[in-house]
Amino acid sequence: YLQLYYEKGLEKPFREFKLEICHEISEPRLQNYDENGRIHSLRIDRVTYKEKKKYQPKPAVAHVAEREQVIKLGTTNYDDFLSFIRAVQDRLMDLPVLSMDLCTVGLNYLEEEIAVDVRDEFSGLVSKGDNQILQHRVLTRVHILSFLSGLAECRLGLNDVLVKGNEIVSRQDIMPTTTTKWIKLHECHFHRCVDEDVFNSSRVILFNPLDACRLELMMFTTVFAEKTLPFTLRTVASISGAEVEVQSWLRMSSGFSSNCDPLT
């Protein structure tokens, strides 16, 4: 259960509800708070995905999300905001999987589909003078959304350095790939629909997807190989009476690898 309190130390929450696999966190937003500032806000929605036919401009089938707001929250404390998001994300990922949630034999979609969404989250501490990265953390989150008819067993392969050299073979337990860029995965954490024993032995992500439900399949950390950020942005604002002047400077880093590549 998710319990919400007006402040730390209170015994009774002002709101309590059970987190379910159909719940999703909205994208964070900045909204007007008062005359001098803005507030960080987000929603927790109950999301249902349905298959619908569309006839304009031509006949097609689409999988559409229908959202119902469960709660909307806001705060001016950005650290609390990020902490809340991570806590809810982790709890949603660890929810138990019931047999009724999986793709089953009785399902029959007009158009089958599975979507994979990979997002990298970078956080770091940068020195003021030369913009050198003092501390950093790169967290990668992999989400899936599937509409599959019948029982499904899916395999997902990554550019994992531990399969380098075995990527183009006929064995079924190795996922083929043609990448030349490899990464080393750290602190891997999986959704309960993933067979972790298979991953540990073959580095293949074997899973039974949940039906019409967006879920976080796995997350892992990697090492950021660069010593500087790709660019820095400096902004200065000056106020003179009723006029506000804003100036910004975008500076590309010559030490960042992709900035050194010739333009094509």
Image (cartoon, grey):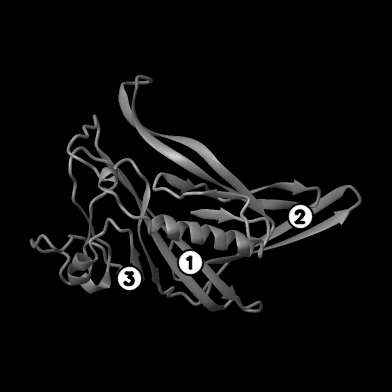
Residue most extreme to the front: 11
Q: Amino acid at mark 1?
A: Asn
Image spot of residue 66 (x, y percent)? 44, 34
Image spot of residue 209 (x, y percent)? 26, 49
Mark 2 Cα-neighbour bin, 10 Å: few <14, some 14–19, many ≥20: few
Q: Which mark is residue 259?
A: 1
Q: Amino acid at mark 3?
A: Ile
Mark 3 lies on residue:
183
Mark closest to the chain's N terminus, 1 or 3: 3
Q: Give the CA separation, mark 2 to mark 3.
A: 40 Å
* Residue 29 appears in the rendering: no
Mark closest to the chain's N terminus, 2 or 1: 2
Mark 2 lies on residue:
246
Q: Are marks 2 and 3 in contact (CB under 8 Å)?
A: no
User: Going 32% across and 70% down the picture, which residue do you hit?
Assistant: 183
User: Going 31% across and 25% down the picture, which residue do you hit?
Assistant: 60
Q: Quadrant of residue 176?
A: bottom left
Nearest-to-viewer mark from 2 and 1: 2
* Residue 133 appears in the rendering: yes
Q: Give the CA separation, mark 1 to mark 3.
A: 20 Å
56 up-or-down from 222: above or below:
above
Find numbered disc 1 in the image and state the secondary structure of the residue it sits on: helix
Q: Which mark is residue 61?
A: none
Find numbered disc 3 in the image and state the secondary structure of the residue it sits on: loop
